[in-house]
Amino acid sequence: MAKRTIKTGEAEVLYKVSKPVKSFDEKLHQLLDDMADTMYAADGVGLAAPQVGVLRRVVVIDCSESRDELIEAVNPEIIETSGEQAGMEGCLSFPDEQGWVIRPNVAVMRAYDRHGNMFEMRGEGLLARAMLHECDHLDGRVYKTLVVPTPEGYGEE
């Protein structure tokens, strides 16, 4: 396992559409392992393959406080959303930046695991936000395109 370099800012790979994974092989397993290592080392809750320079439809997510609930999703797609949440969002590809983003509060994702087994999972709150954020990366979209003005009074005590 190895930590990879996270692409930042205007790196072209962040704005391109990723290709589907066709081979569930050792190369994919290595990518998933490296992405998890990279995400944890950067203290992130999610990472998409384009963020490490690989244009493949692969994401890793771990929103748990214990950092031991790794989700590996290959060829993920959001198949359902509902509700609404709003809050500050950031991205490992845009360090030290955040913006107010409105997203669905619930998301259902269909994906494959590293062995090619299909699964579906439902996320709410932060997990839904992470699923949506990482899947956006696979289509060349970054959260900054979703930023809206921060509500007046946000962050005041």
Image (cartoon, grey):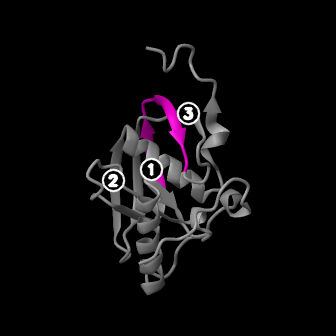
In the image: residue 70, left or right of residue 130 = left
What residue sits 59% from the left and 55% below the top? 137
Of mark 3 and mark 2, the one earlier in the sequence is 3
Residue 2, image x and y in percent? 45, 76
Label 2, label 1: how many angstroms apart (C-alpha)?
10 Å
Identify which amino acid the numbered label 1 is placed on.
Met
In the rendered image, which quarter contains the C terminus?
top left
Marks 2 and 1: CB-CB under 8 Å? yes
Q: Residue 35 or 74: which is nearer the viewer?
A: 35
Taking 61 as reference, is 74 above or below it?
below
> What stretch of residues is rendered in magenta?
77-91
What residue sits 53% from the left and 13% below the top? 153
Marks 3 and 2: CB-CB under 8 Å? no
- Magenta-colored stretch includes residue 156: no
Marks 1 and 3: CB-CB under 8 Å? no
What residue sits 63% from the left and 28% below the top? 148
Name the mark nearer the viewer: 2 or 1. 1
Principal secondary structure, stretch drawn in magenta: strand
Identify which amino acid the numbered label 2 is placed on.
Met
Label 3, label 2: how many angstroms apart (C-alpha)?
22 Å
Q: Residue 16 or 69: which is nearer the viewer?
A: 69
Residue 123, image x and y in percent? 35, 45
Q: Which residue is labeled 1 in the image?
A: 131
Taking 71 as reference, is 45 above or below it?
above
Q: Which residue is labeled 3 in the image?
A: 101
Q: Which residue is labeled 2 in the image?
A: 121
Q: Quadrant of residue 105?
A: top left
